[in-house]
Image: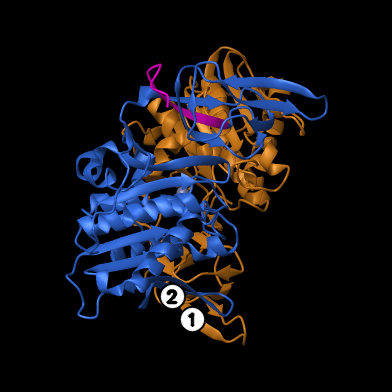
Chain colours: A orange, B blue
Amino acid sequence: MEKEILFQIPSLYRDDFRIRGYRFGQGKKALCVVGSMRGNEYQQIYTCSQLVARLKELEGRGLLKEDQEILVIPSLNPSSMNIEKRFWPTDNSDINRMFPGYSLGETTQRIAAGVFGQIKDFENGIQFASFYMPGKFSPHVRMMKTGYENVEKAREFGLPYIVLRVPKPYDTTTLNYNWQIWETNAFSLYGAATDTIDEESARRLIDGILRFLASEGILKEGAQADPPRESRVFTDRELLAVRSRKSGILKSLVGVEVKVAQGQLLGYLLDTGEGRRIEELYAPLDGTVFFAHSKPLVYANTAVFKLLAGEEPFRGER
Amino acid sequence: MMMTVACLPLPVDETLEIKKNRFCPGNGGNGRRISVVTGIHGDELEGQLVCFQVAKRIRENPERLLGTVDLYPAINPLGIDSVTRGIPGFDLDMNRTFPGAMEGSLTEHLAACVVQDLVGSDLCLDIHASNIYLTEIPQIRINELHREKLMPLAMEANVDLIWVHGANTVLESTLAHSMNSLGVPTLVVEMGVGMRLTPAYADQLTQGIFHLMERLRIWKEEEIPVRTPVVSEDPDEVTYLNAPVSGIFQKKKNHGEHLKKGDEVGIVLNPYTGEVLTSMTAPGDGWLFTIREYPVVDEGSLIARILREPPGCAG
Ligand SMILES: [Zn+2]
């Protein structure tokens, strides 16, 4: 493993801004993995750092192919994470809205350009992503429907779900979208948490990446990777949102990946003054909880749960 | 007449409301309508003074009002009240949420209510104040997609500059893009600087608004004079200066000044050592229409925008 600095900006009053990469193997640019881009993406940096540890161990045992290059970048944004701020410290801009970047532009455009220049030629790209609403997801691979998406390859992770997202206007400046445009197979991996750490979810995503490496022939024979599993593929529009009509304290009765029956009570809202139930949230159909809101308070109109209808072929990974 | 545009309960004993004030003549007026919108970005306050002045002038001269004037001073009330640019709690730029969705999340719902309420206006002005970093001369920014419809209106708005920019997918989620796509002509005004009021600019734009109202037969007044703006349509005419190093920026020129090639626009300092780290100069003759106000800069921070001028036209 080579530890290197991929991009750097000197600062007057803080330490230099540094983006660090961990490189395994040399030769064909096989896979790049990006962890956190925002200062609250703790689960993402954690998962990435655990992946580095896992790859280092495999490398030590001689199980990584030496002619296949893997680059892991746990954080594109140490400056924000170190001060517990989500976006860029000085101007609050979001690095994941700056791709492909511009090397003569504003600071975060320069960061995006500096990094993208070094990662755009990889055959496969993985980003540990987060959602703008606080909540937990079933582990899944998400891809934008740009026409370049490679669903068959996404199956190699063996995660329960593959979600296809129809890009919205602002998606065109994300890393995932630009990777796809530059002909990298781009995958966003979502897990259970963002601003807390969930071991189980990190482990499942890392196992998924090892399955992917095995299918891609980047692991040598003898490296233990679980056999691939069936993923269910759907578009994000197929998810059914269960929304709050009121605001209050949320009590959830079910978590992600739980199967629920039509009419089942999923959770309820409490009045913040008197503690009484003011709203009950029921499952409108038989399905599986794909997303669950995770903050104590909910606003009115919040998608508290997102359900996936019907039976899924996936069977207990745990 | 105070009216509610959107209304949602917050968790702890508070209601989030977006309100507008509607002015119309006693007889209901001629049905023509102008909407003046501001405060999408909670840290941009220049529009507050404009709304105040428009309201005041109508109250003082009610007999001149022929149509409807809707004033929306606080599209993002939680942001304005908490010195937050975006929507607090979501860390989301409200001007990236349009056209929204009635059945969507809180932010999408608010955006959809605003759009629905503005439909039917003959003209909408969305007043911004740059951000806390940059000062802008009064200008209107037009997406080239809507150039034909908006240019004649923008010419009458008493601003100094009309800047036509290229279509950009990201800007499709702005209020102005949504409204223009729905057929409501919407002008985006940028002027002054975030977190401050510039009374002279408020006066200037207020004058432009009454001139437009007179043109739209919403207001009855003898000819209200307006200035002729500079129009920039060629992206190559605009030069951007970005800080080459991190440090403390001190401006040496003010916005609106005409520059000669080589004029020092500002410097980046190192307070530890007393060194000037860099001096930033005009790459050619031009008009400084944006200048950095906020002193702390990172490498890459925007310092200035300069509109190219042929030599000798400075005045
Ligand atoms: Zn603004």
Q: Is residue B151 above or below residue B86?
A: above
**Residue occupying the far right of the picture:** B272
Q: Are marks 2 and 1 on the same chain?
A: yes
Write down the residue under mark 1.
Answer: A279
The subunit carrying tag 1 is A
Please tell me whether residue B20 belongs to the stretch shown in magenta.
no
Task: Specify whether A225 is left or right of B164.
Answer: right
Q: Categorize mark 1 by other alpha carbons within 10 Å: few (<14), some (14-19), many (20+).
A: some
Q: Residue at x 53, y 18 (%)?
A: A29
Residue sitting nearer the eye, B258 or B276:
B258
Q: Which residue is outermost to the front? A: B222
CA distance for labels 2 and 1? 8 Å
Q: Amino acid at mark 1?
A: Glu
Q: State the image coordinates of residue A63 (x, y, percent, origin top left).
A: 65, 22
Image: B121 above or below A201: below
Residue found 27% across the figure and 43% down from its top: B155
Which residue occupies the extreme left position in the image?
B30
Frontmost residue, A239 versus B43? B43
Tell me the subunit letter for badge 2. Answer: A
Q: Residue at x 37, y 34 (%)?
A: A149
Q: Answer with left or right where residue A233 lies relative to residue A293.
A: left
Classify the position of the N terminus of chain B by image quarter: bottom left
Whole-percent x, y for residue B142 in the image: 31, 41
Residue range of the region highlighted in magenta in the rendering: B302-315
| Disc 2: which residue | A245
Residue A80, given in percent of the width and then of the height, sits at 67, 42
- The residue at label 1 has a CB less than 8 Å from ligand 1: no
Please tell me which of labels 2 and 1 falls first in the chain.
2
